[in-house]
Image: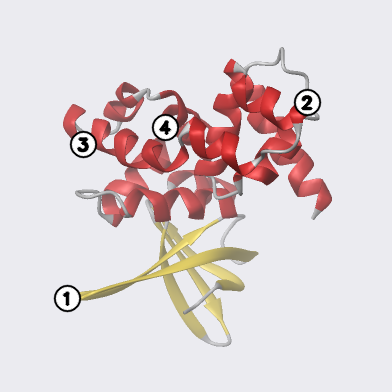
C-alpha cells in the first residue's frame, strides 16, 4: 500500500496531479480542492494516497489532507458510489461541510454535484449516518458528565458526529468539542476542533 507521495509536481489537469518521485511520475486522481492547494508546476508536492484496485484497473488517488482522504474512503464504501463520484462530491464541498451534511442528514446538498441524484444522495447519508448514531456517541464517553452534556446538545452533538465522519474517534471528538463554546455554529465548532486537534499533533 502506498501511504503517501512527496516529490516534484510535473503536471496538473482537472482531477489529476502527477508527482515525480525518484524519477517515477505517479498519476494521482484527485479533487479540485486538493488541486487548488498544490503549488505551481515544478514545486514540491505532498499527497496522502489511496490505492484503488479492481479487476480492470489500478488507480492511485491523492489528497491534501487526512480529512479529505477519510471522506473519500467513506464515500466509496457506500453502495453505488465509485471513486469518480467520490471525487466529484469532494470537489464540490470541503471535508468539514461533507461531514456536517452527513451528520445533519442534509442529502440535498449532495444533489448539487453533477451525476448525483436524490436516491444516491440519500443512500450516502443513510449508510454513513448509521455509523455515528447518538447512542454510540453517548456510550463511548460514559463516565464523564461533561462528555455526556456535550453529546446530548444540539450543535455540539452534530459537530461530534461530523468529526467522527472525518475519521476521529467518538471519545476524541467529544473531548475536543467539550472545550469549545457550545453557542458556536456547527461549522465553527468543527473548524475550531480541527485546529485544536492539528495543534496537538
Residue 154: quarter of image: top right
Q: Do the residues labelled 3 and 4 touch (CB within 8 Å)?
A: no
Q: Which residue lies furthest to the front in this view?
A: 143
Badges 2 and 1: C-beta atoms under 8 Å apart?
no
Count residues near mark 4 (Cα–Cα under 10 Å), then give few for <14, some for 14-19, many for 20+: many
Q: Which of marks 3 and 1 is in front?
A: 3
Q: Quadrant location of residue 104?
A: top left
**Nearest to viewer (mark 2 / mark 1):** 2
**Horizontal arrangement in the rendering, residue 94 relative to residue 176 (left or right):** left
State how far apart marks 3 and 1 are (Cα). 24 Å
CA distance separating discs 4 and 2: 22 Å
Q: Name the residue under label 1.
A: 56
Q: Do the residues labelled 4 and 2 touch (CB within 8 Å)?
A: no
Residue located beneath label 3 in the image: 120
CA separation in Å, label 3 and label 4: 13 Å
Residue behind mark 2: 180
Among the two numbered marks 3 and 4 on one chain, the one whose residue lies closer to the N terminus: 4
| Residue 102 marker | 4
Vertical order, 47 against 161 (above or below)? below
Which numbered marker is on residue 192?
none
N-term mark: 4 or 1: 1
Q: Which of marks 2 and 1 is nearer the N terminus?
A: 1
**How far is mark 3 from mark 2, CA to CA?**
34 Å
Q: Specify the quadrant that holds the C terminus.
A: bottom right
Residue 62 is situated, as x and y percent measured from the top left of the image, at 48, 62
Q: Is mark 3 on a helix, strand or loop?
A: helix
Residue, x 33% and y 34% (percent of image)?
A: 125
Amino acid at each position: 500500500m502506498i501511504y503517501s507521495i512527496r516529490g516534484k509536481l510535473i503536471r496538473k489537469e482537472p482531477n489529476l496531479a502527477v508527482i515525480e518521485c525518484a524519477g517515477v511520475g505517479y498519476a494521482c486522481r484527485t479533487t479540485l480542492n486538493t488541486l487548488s492547494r498544490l503549488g505551481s508546476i515544478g514545486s514540491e508536492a505532498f499527497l496522502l494516497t489511496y490505492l484503488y484496485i479492481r479487476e480492470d484497473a489500478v488507480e492511485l488517488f491523492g489528497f491534501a489532507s487526512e480529512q479529505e482522504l477519510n471522506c473519500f474512503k467513506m464515500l466509496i464504501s457506500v453502495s453505488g458510489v465509485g471513486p469518480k463520484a467520490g471525487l466529484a462530491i469532494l470537489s464540490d464541498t470541503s471535508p468539514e461541510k461533507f461531514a456536517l451534511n452527513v451528520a445533519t442528514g442534509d442529502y440535498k446538498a449532495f444533489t448539487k454535484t453533477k451525476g448525483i441524484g436524490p436516491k444516491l444522495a440519500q443512500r450516502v447519508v443513510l449508510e454513513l449516518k448509521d455509523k455515528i448514531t447518538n447512542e454510540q456517541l453517548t456510550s463511548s464517553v460514559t463516565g464523564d458528565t461533561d462528555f455526556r452534556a456535550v453529546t446530548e446538545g444540539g450543535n455540539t452533538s452534530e459537530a461530534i458526529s461530523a468529526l467522527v465522519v472525518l475519521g476521529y474517534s467518538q471519545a476524541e471528538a467529544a473531548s475536543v468539542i467539550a472545550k469549545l463554546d457550545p453557542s458556536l455554529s456547527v461549522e465553527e465548532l468543527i473548524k475550531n476542533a480541527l485546529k485544536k486537534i492539528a495543534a496537538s499533533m
